[in-house]
Image (cartoon, rainbow, N blue to C red):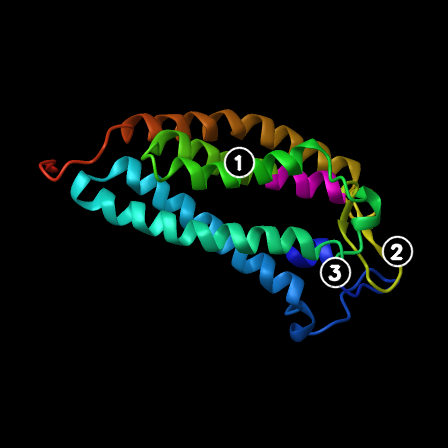
Amino acid sequence: MGNLLHGIPINRQMNYVGNFLTLLNPYALVGAVATLLLFLRHGALYLELKVPDELSEGAHKIAYRVGMWATVFYFAFVVMRYFEANFAHRLGIDPGPIPVLAGISIIAVRFLLPGRQRGWAFFAGGLTIVFSVISVFLVLFPRVMISTLNPDWTLTIYNASSNPYSLKVMTIVAISVLPIVLAYQAWSYWVFRKRVSLKDTFHY
């Protein structure tokens, strides 16, 4: 994701011409660490909601400690975009309401955790992820991969898309399968909606 925002060397033929080390630039690495810590914290917040009180305390400590570093790297990634990412000139200093909401939600988790407001903390953490993903799409659109060699060689949803027939088939398949996926996800969350207890047993 960091490299998508930063840009990579793509030539006129729309081929990647860098090497593995090209991808290991500071901006991408900070983004990778921020993303890892963000999801690690979110996983700990989920465990805090689901596991027994005996284990919930450990999940809470992990969420709090990891959350501090997740917040630091998250905002470091945001600040670095003004110096590293070549899309910053499109937004200026004001990134817009959705990125601001992402920043507010990640800070909110820090204030909700000490009060043991587990549900609200998990909800705020989810908003951080959702708003961050939306921000990436808004910043890149209509681009998919930015070329650092020449803006005209950037991959967009227009020059990198499949032919109309393939897109039509993919749309039909997506519309047909999506309800099944959503139903399965809803059923899974419903089955596992309760907090796990140490007294729970499984019968085969």
Q: Residue at x 46, y 48 (%)?
A: 39
What residue is disc 3 on? 84
Q: Is residue 175 magenta?
A: no
Identify residue type, mark 2.
Answer: Pro
Q: Is residue 1 visible?
A: no
Up the image or down, 189 lies above or below 95; here it is: above
Up the image or down, 168 lies above or below 35; here it is: above
Sequence-earlier tag: 2 or 3: 3
What residue is disc 2 on? 151
**Front-most of residues 49 and 155:** 49
Q: Which residue is drawn at 84% across and 49% down?
A: 89
Q: What element carries label 1?
A: helix
Query: Which quadrant: the C terminus?
Result: top left
Callout 1: 10 Å neighbours few (<14), some, many (20+)?
Answer: many
Residue 203 image offset from top left, x and y in percent:
10, 36
Identify residue type, mark 3.
Answer: Glu
What residue is disc 1 on? 105
Q: Is residue 139 magenta?
A: yes
Please provide the residue range marked out in magenta: 132-140
